[in-house]
Image (tube, grey):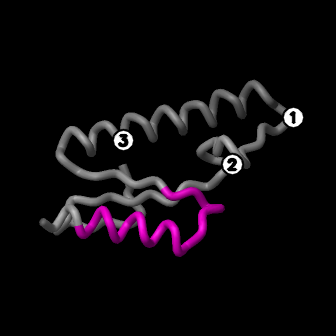
Amino acid sequence: MTVDIVFPSADVAVFVDGCFWHRCPEHGTMPKANAAWWRKKLEANVERDRRTDQALRDRGWTVIRVWEHESVTDAAERIEQAVTAGRR
């Protein structure tokens, strides 16, 4: 598992997910060419994300997933809140 940003003192792991690769419900698209292969590939990505999230949570970490289309300000505020809460 590779985490994009780690705050070890607060046990916060942040992933920045691309809308295509992680099947964003708002912006995710499905290619028409070789659709069955892509569906399987992208569904496997989502399942891996879920397993990773659960494994980290089982170890006491807070997991934050930020979509690539999210406002940087909104994402930063969510992360800051989690880091602050984790350091208490």
Disc 2 + disc 3, Cβ < 8 Å = no
**Location of mark 1 (residue):** 32
State the separation of the CA atoms marked 1 and 2.
Answer: 13 Å
Observer-nearest of 32 and 67: 67
State the separation of the CA atoms marked 2 and 3.
Answer: 19 Å
Q: Is residue 82 magenta?
A: yes
| Rendered-image quadrant of the C terminus | bottom left
Q: Amino acid at mark 1?
A: Lys
Q: Amino acid at mark 2?
A: Phe
In this view, the residue farthest toward the bottom is 73
**Location of mark 3 (residue):** 52
Q: Quadrant of residue 13?
A: bottom left
Q: Which segment is the magenta one?
A: 66-84
**Location of mark 2 (residue):** 20
Q: Residues within 10 Å of mark 3 (few under 14, many from 20)?
A: some
Observer-nearest of 5 and 77: 77
* Residue 87 tag number: none
Q: Position of residue 78 (x, y in %)?
A: 41, 64
Q: Residue at x 48, y 32 (%)?
A: 47
Q: Position of residue 9 (x, y in %)?
A: 16, 68
Along the polypeptide, which appears first: circle 1 or circle 2?
2
- Secondary structure beneath disc 2? loop
- Secondary structure beneath disc 3? helix
Q: Position of residue 64 (x, y in %)?
A: 40, 55
